[in-house]
Image (tube, rainbow, N blue to C red):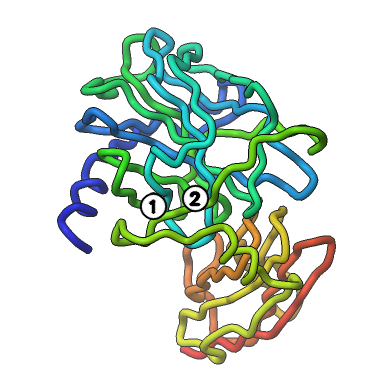
Amino acid sequence: MNKRALYVLGILLLAPGTSYSGLVGSIDGILGLRPVGDRSCLAQEIVIPEGQALAGLRWFHNDGTLAFPQLLLLGGTPSQLPGGLQLAGVELTNVRGPSLGWGEVSFREPVTSASGLAVAVFVLPAHAERTGDGASGGPGIGFRRQLGGPRAFVSADGVFWEQMNNGFRLAVEPVLEPLGGTATLLSSRGSSPDGVGVAPVEAFAASAPSETRLLPATPNPSNPSTAIGFELRRPGEIRIQIFDLAGRHVRTLADGVWPAGRHSVTWSGTDDRESPVASSVYLVRLEADGRNWTQRLALVR
């Protein structure tokens, strides 16, 4: 990892272990940045289901006394980082929300994306750091712990991006409506992990899987980790679980909305409590697109 990426990761500041479960819409904490530059950003990938459009967004807001100078919508691309802020197809300014509550904005016209993905970018007030929870606590957005699904990103300058840990996502939710009539189409251009190069939406459309399916795990047998691949022909809710041969649940590897494309999750031979399980044959089950797929996994220690 280069020095630029190390700096971006270093500015992440997770909230203390406070319980937020009593608030409207359960979250696990508040996330902000330190330090904050002129164009520091938090961003969340948004899945737009087939036949739907984005009418607006909801997010969990920390400090109601501060506004986000900009809320931008970029087109998303699977396996790519967001592009530059100049590629935004939608821009809102002076975006406010309540202290420790859900803010909401509506767009002038519905928004869609040929890739089925958008990226909501919250530009933070320059040099304003999060110092606490609620009013006068500084800019921040709620987060949830969730395996897999839409990705969250951070940028120190709005140019170079880093994906957050896959176990975290920002509390940013789409407000959807049926697609019909006029809509803003986002241009899907993302950056490669080193910050250069773009992937046009035409390239994504040409390579999108024609069907949803579970791919063979590699390696199988495993000792103990194995990669479980799968393809989704369209965005949607998925669940990937591990069971023993008696049908007892062992581990949930993914549970949420994922974009179309080819993906992979890793099972390290542990249960939901992160405790190692015994050598045996297990079943992995993918639930997606209204169907189920199952295959056997041999764990050898």
| Label tally | 2
The tag earlier along the polypeptide, 1 or 2, is 2
User: Image quarter for residue 106?
Assistant: top right
Question: Label 1: few (<14), some or many (≥20) within 10 Å?
Answer: some
Q: Horizontal placement of 153 versus 221: left or right?
A: left
Amino acid type at mark 1: Gln
Give the vertical position of 108 relative to 83 (above or below). Answer: above
The image quadrant where one finds the N terminus is bottom left
User: Image quarter for residue 197?
Assistant: bottom left
From mark 1 to mark 2, how far is it between C-alphas?
7 Å
Amino acid type at mark 2: Arg
> What residue is shown at x 43% (from left), y 11% (from top)?
64
> What residue is shown at x 44% (from left), y 54% (from top)?
190
**Disc 1 element:** strand
Q: Position of residue 268 (x, y in %)?
A: 48, 74
Answer yes or no: is residue 273 visible.
no
Name the mark on residue 163.
1
> What residue is shown at x 39% (from left), y 36% (from top)?
42
**Disc 2 element:** loop
Q: Are marks 1 and 2 in contact (CB under 8 Å)?
A: yes
Q: 157 or 203, which lies in front?
A: 203
- Residue located farthest toward the left when viewing the structure as drawn: 3
Name the mark on residue 174.
none
Give the vertical position of 190 relative to 244 (above or below). Answer: above
> What residue is shown at x 59% (from left), y 75% (from top)?
229
Q: Which residue is mark 2?
A: 151
Give the vertical position of 170 relative to 234 (above or below). Answer: above
Q: 88 or 209, which lies in front?
A: 88
